[in-house]
Amino acid sequence: MFTLQDYKSTPDTIQQYNKEKQDLPIIIDNGSFQCRAGWSTSENPELIYKNVMAKNRANRKERDWDIQVGNEIADIEAVRWMVRSPYDFNVVVNFSAQETLLDYAFKHLGINTNDSVTHPIVITEPIANPSYCQKNMSELLFEAYSIPKVAFGIDCLFSYNNNCLGEDNDSTALIVSCGFQSTHVLPVIDRQPDIKNALRLNLGGYNCTAYLQWLLQYRHPQHVGEFTLNRMENLVHQLGKVAPNYSELVNQWTDSVFSAQHITEVSFTPRATNLAPRPGYMQSSYLALEKKLKQTEYKLYEVECVMDIEQENPEGAAKGCLDVGCDDMEELKLHAEGLQSEIDNIQSELDEEYRNESTVKQKNNMFKLGIEKFQSPEIIFQPSLVGYDQCGLSECIETVLQRYDATVQERLANNVFITGGNSKLNGFIERVSVDLRKIRPHTAPVCVKHASKPSLDAWKGAAKWANSDQCQSYFISKSDYEEFGAQYYKQHSFSNRWVDPTLNASK
């Protein structure tokens, strides 16, 4: 049995800033699900928090706002309607929220300078990030924080840098980036990303979670309020599976014996509500039995009082017998035995009623999870399940491969690298491998690799690059920004390609 739990975040502590950290680059993996920030010399990021903020008016009269950021939001479901993200899909568009989130990161890294952050910044961005969004991010970093220099890079390329680069046979690869809001297929040819031939699927980890929530709310309407996005994230991460052959699996689940063997029972603690529960049938029955028990016990008490005075006051005892409906003491004793037997029976019924009510409550706080654990991740491979008119991930890979000649196709298919948090789903790598073998010729080599730490490797790869000598010429300095403007961009092996924003798109 699996227990459904609510994710409760723990507030981050403000770290100690010392002289050893002066001039160290700060690495920010600015993902749409989580932000990871830390020093380039650290093994892991110092901060990992959900990239959202909640803005609530604390005092309406004084127009005072209470802002919670990242891990400061203890129960995100309680403030879900107030949650704001800087992202629209996987692109930063709300730079006011982005500034608040960066403030949180710099503050908790211990940076205590009031008007500036005197550290180089390496920050990730999505594939084919629009020039307008990159321009605004540069403007935010230089104007709001007066940083000395900044470098941009694609998250999945940094992840690839941390895992595979270093040998000649790794210079060409097909990277599959499984993100929170989208999934990308990006070819890398001789260490250079071929952005023009990349494909994007507008489905990611969030969509898997939302689809599972819809499925369970539809199939268990009595628990509709219990299936929160927070809980569904936990359920997808723990129990979500990708089937190697989905159509075959669906046929197997039509067999009652197979489904009974593979169903998972999930229990949960009901979320607190402001409404008092209405007494049900069993609760009313239980109260009626308790009332009957008290009345019977009182009758037995009266009979025992009459029996107690039989020796001392025979006349009073005889009158007492008549009061309780008995003719003599013998009949009174039989009546007492009958009352005691009735009390025993009522107590037995109460115990049974209590057990039944507890069992019903326990069953009411449970549901069965069957094929839904395969259905929710399947939308990445079959977007039509949720009404998306797009090809699935396997078809995206096939389409990208077909854009190259046979020699390059073979090199790409022999080095498929999968990264991103959504790729951690059980069976994801196996499914891509199975589908890729169906695409390729029978004797063609196929190799699918998985990032060692899919959620952290983008940050680790960026830190590795920031500590190398080759990166220094790819930073955009404050003087570059002031001379060439916010749209100035330096491209490198791990970055997007610069596109002139004034270029006529029709040409």
Image: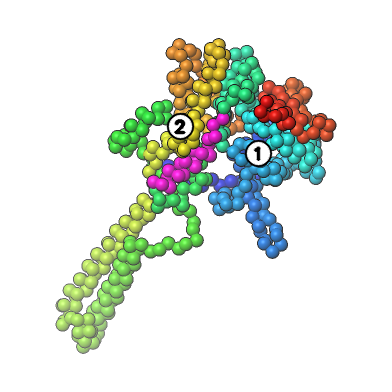
**Residue 33 percent location from the top left of the image:** 59, 39
Residue at the bottom extreme of this rendering: 315
What's the mark number on residue 357? Answer: none
Mark 2 residue type: Gln
Q: Which residue is mark 1?
A: 92
The N terminus appears in which quarter of the rendering?
top left
Instruction: Classify 19 as above or below 114.
Output: above
**Residue 241 percent location from the top left of the image:** 44, 33
Residue in the image at 58% along x and 46% along y: 9
Q: Which element is circle 2 on?
A: loop
Instruction: Classify 355 as above or below 237.
Output: below
Residue in the image at 60% along x and 13% along y: 169
Mark 1 residue type: Val
**Chief SS of the magenta region:** helix
Q: Which residue is mark 2?
A: 382
Residue 347 versus residue 353: which sits nearer the camera? 353
Task: Give the class, few, some or many, for how many residues have Cα within 10 Å of label 2's Cα (few <14, many ≥20).
Answer: many
Left or right: residue 443 versus residue 53 is left
Magenta region: which residues? Answer: 200-219
Mark 2 and mark 1 lie on one chain; the one further toward the N terminus is 1
Residue 296 versus residue 500: which sits nearer the camera? 500
**Res 473 visible:** yes
Residue 352 versus residue 442: which sits nearer the camera? 442
Give the distance between the C-alpha atoms of the residues marked 2 and 1, in whole angstroms.
27 Å
Residue in the image at 60% along x and 52% along y: 82
The C terminus appears in which quarter of the rendering?
top right
Instruction: Classify 164 as above or below 6.
Output: above
Instruction: Classify 329 as above or below 126.
Output: below
